[in-house]
Image: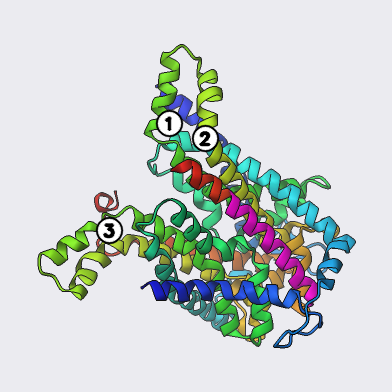
C-alpha cells in the first residue's frame, strides 16, 4: 500500500505535466476546430459552434492534400525502414566503445540539428517532393534505427547459428527465424516512421515547394498566413486521427504474451 | 553487410559534410569545386546581434528543458523498475503526437498566458519531448544492482535520503549527465514548437533561421548550421562517452 502511494508520488510529476500540457491542448484544439473564423477581428469566434471546418476538410477540395499526405507518410516509412535496418543491424551485438561510436554515428544526423540536412538538401536539389522526402528520411531514420536497435539487442541471436546447425539454409534462417524475431521491432519502427511521416512539416515546408504541401504545412499556412485558426485546428485534429490510427494498429499475430 | 552499413552511414553523414563545406566557401553562392576557404560567414554569424541573442536564448532554454527532463526522469525511472507499465506510454505521448497539431493546440493556451511566460511554456513542452530519452538512459542505470546497493546502504543504517545522496546519485551521475546533455541538445534544435509559440523578438535560433531557410539560403545560415552541428555533436559525443565509460 505504502509502495503504491510512493510510486504514485514519484510518477506523478511527469504524468501531471503531460496531463497539464497535452490534454488541455488537445481539448483546445478540438474546440478550436469547431469554432467559426473571426473574419478580421482576432483569430476565431470563441462563442461559436460549427462543423464547417470539417465539412470543408472532407470535401473534394482537400482530397488531394490528404491523399498526398498519406502517400508521403508511406513513402517516408518505406525509405526509413531499410536505412534504419542497415544502421541498427551491425550494432545488435556490439558493446563498449564500439557501441557508443555506433550510437553517435546513428544519432549524429538528429543531434546535429535539423538545419544541416535541410541546408545541404536546399543546396544540392531543386525544391520538390523528392527533396522533401529525403529530408524527412534523414530526420526520422535515427529515431527508427534507435528503436530497432533496442529491440534487436534484446534478442538471443545464437538461435540463428542453431538453425544453421540443424540444417536450415541461409534464406530459411533469415526468413523463418531472423525476420519473425525482429518483426515487432520493425513494426514499431515502421509505426514511428509512418506517424512522423504523416505529420511531416520541416522537409515539405522548406524543400517541398508548392507541389510538396502536406496537411502539416497547410496547417501552418492557414494559421499564420491566412489567420484561419479554426481550419488549421481542424487539420490538426485530422492529423491526430490519422496518426492515432497508425499507432493503434497491432502487428499480425500480436499477443500480450509474445510482446512480453 | 558491413559495406552496406558503411554506405548507409556515409549517406546519412553526407548532408552534414556538404553544409560544413558550404559554410567555409568564400562565395555567397555554392559552386563546386571550392578551392578557397574562408571563415567570413562564421564571423558574420558570431558577430550578428540577433543571431547571438537567439543562440543564447536557445542555450538557456535548452539547459532548463534538459534539467527539467532529467528531474522528471529520475523518479519515473525508479518507478518503472526496468519494466514497461501501461501508463508509461503516457510519457511517450508528446513525442508521438504530430508536433504541428500539438503546437496548434498550445497556441490558444500560450495566448492566454501573461506576457513573457510563453517561453516558460516552451521550456516545459521541450522538456516533455526530451523526457523519453532521459528516461531511457537513466532507466538503464536503475537496475537490480542499483536497488541492492540502496538496500545495503539502508541496512548499514543510512536514512533513505542519505542512501540516495551518498550512494544512489553518485552511481547515477553518468546517466544523469548523459541524459541532461542529450535532452538539452534535442531541445536546442527543436524548431516546430518554437515557430508556433515564439513571439517576435524572443525567437530561438531555429525559429529565427526558419524564414531565411525558407526564402533564400545564405552562407551565414550554413555557418550557423555548422556551428550548431559542431556543438551538438561534441556535446552528444561527450555525453555518450561519459555514459559508455561508466556503463561498462
Q: Nearer the viewer, residue A132 or A201?
A: A132
Mark 3–mark 2 CB contact (< 8 Å): no
Q: In the visual, does B34 lie left or right of B92? A: right
Q: Chain of mark 1?
A: B
Q: Chain of mark 3?
A: A
Residue B208 appears in the rendering: yes
Q: Is residue B242 above or below residue A231?
A: above
List the residue tagged with mark 2: B172
Q: Is residue A254 above or below residue B177?
A: below
Q: Magenta segment range?
A: B218-238
Q: Residue at x 46, y 53 (%)?
A: A97
SS at mark 2?
helix
* Pointer 3 local density, CA inside 10 Å: few below 14, some 14–19, many at least 20: few
Is-magenta flag for residue B220? yes
List the residue tagged with mark 3: A254
Disc 3 and disc 2 on one polypeptide chain: no
Amino acid at each position: 500500500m505504502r509502495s503504491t502511494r510512493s510510486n504514485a508520488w514519484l510518477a506523478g510529476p511527469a504524468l501531471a505535466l503531460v496531463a497539464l500540457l497535452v490534454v488541455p491542448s488537445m481539448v483546445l484544439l478540438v474546440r478550436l476546430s469547431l469554432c467559426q473564423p473571426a473574419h478580421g477581428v482576432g483569430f476565431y469566434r470563441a462563442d461559436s459552434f460549427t462543423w464547417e471546418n470539417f465539412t470543408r476538410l472532407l470535401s473534394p477540395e482537400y482530397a488531394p492534400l490528404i491523399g498526398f499526405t498519406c502517400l508521403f507518410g508511406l513513402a517516408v516509412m518505406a525509405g526509413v525502414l531499410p536505412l534504419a535496418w542497415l544502421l541498427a543491424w551491425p550494432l545488435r551485438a556490439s558493446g563498449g566503445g564500439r557501441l557508443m561510436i555506433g550510437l553517435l554515428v546513428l544519432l549524429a544526423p538528429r543531434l546535429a540539428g535539423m538545419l544541416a540536412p535541410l541546408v545541404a538538401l536546399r543546396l544540392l536539389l531543386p525544391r520538390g517532393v523528392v527533396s522533401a522526402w529525403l529530408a524527412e528520411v534523414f530526420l526520422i531514420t535515427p529515431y527508427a534505427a534507435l528503436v530497432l536497435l533496442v529491440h534487436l539487442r534484446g534478442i538471443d541471436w545464437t538461435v540463428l547459428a542453431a538453425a544453421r546447425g540443424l540444417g536450415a539454409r541461409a534464406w530459411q534462417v533469415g526468413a523463418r527465424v531472423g525476420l519473425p524475431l525482429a518483426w515487432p521491432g520493425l513494426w514499431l519502427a515502421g509505426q514511428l516512421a509512418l506517424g512522423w511521416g504523416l505529420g511531416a512539416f520541416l522537409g515539405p515546408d522548406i524543400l517541398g515547394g508548392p507541389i510538396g504541401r502536406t496537411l502539416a504545412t497547410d496547417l501552418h499556412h492557414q494559421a499564420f498566413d491566412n489567420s484561419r485558426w479554426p481550419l488549421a485546428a481542424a487539420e490538426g485534429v485530422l492529423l491526430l486521427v490519422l496518426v492515432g490510427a497508425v499507432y493503434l494498429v497491432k502487428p499480425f499475430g500480436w499477443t500480450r504474451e509474445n510482446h512480453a | 553487410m558491413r559495406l552496406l552499413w558503411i554506405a548507409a552511414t556515409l549517406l546519412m553523414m553526407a548532408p552534414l559534410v556538404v553544409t560544413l563545406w558550404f559554410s567555409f566557401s568564400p562565395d555567397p553562392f555554392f559552386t563546386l569545386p571550392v578551392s578557397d576557404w574562408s571563415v567570413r560567414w562564421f564571423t558574420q554569424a558570431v558577430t550578428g546581434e540577433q543571431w547571438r541573442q537567439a543562440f543564447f536564448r536557445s542555450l538557456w532554454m535548452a539547459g532548463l528543458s534538459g534539467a527539467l527532463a532529467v528531474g522528471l526522469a529520475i523518479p519515473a525511472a525508479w518507478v518503472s523498475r526496468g519494466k514497461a507499465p501501461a501508463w508509461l506510454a503516457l510519457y511517450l505521448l508528446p513525442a508521438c503526437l504530430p508536433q504541428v497539431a500539438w503546437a496548434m493546440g498550445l497556441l490558444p493556451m500560450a495566448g492566454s498566458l501573461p506576457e513573457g511566460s510563453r517561453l516558460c511554456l516552451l521550456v516545459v513542452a521541450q522538456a516533455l519531448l526530451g523526457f523519453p530519452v532521459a528516461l531511457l538512459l537513466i532507466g538503464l542505470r536503475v537496475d537490480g544492482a542499483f536497488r541492492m546497493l540502496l538496500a545495503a546502504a539502508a541496512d548499514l543504517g543510512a536514512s533513505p535520503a542519505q542512501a540516495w545522496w551518498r550512494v544512489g546519485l553518485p552511481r547515477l551521475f553518468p546517466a544523469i549527465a548523459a541524459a541532461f546533455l542529450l535532452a538539452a541538445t534535442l531541445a536546442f534544435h527543436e524548431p516546430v514548437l518554437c515557430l508556433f509559440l515564439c513571439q517576435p523578438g524572443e525567437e530561438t535560433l531555429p525559429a529565427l533561421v526558419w524564414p531565411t531557410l525558407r526564402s533564400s539560403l545564405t552562407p551565414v545560415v550554413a555557418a550557423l548550421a555548422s556551428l550548431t552541428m559542431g556543438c551538438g555533436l561534441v556535446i552528444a559525443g561527450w555525453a555518450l562517452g561519459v555514459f559508455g565509460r561508466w556503463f561498462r
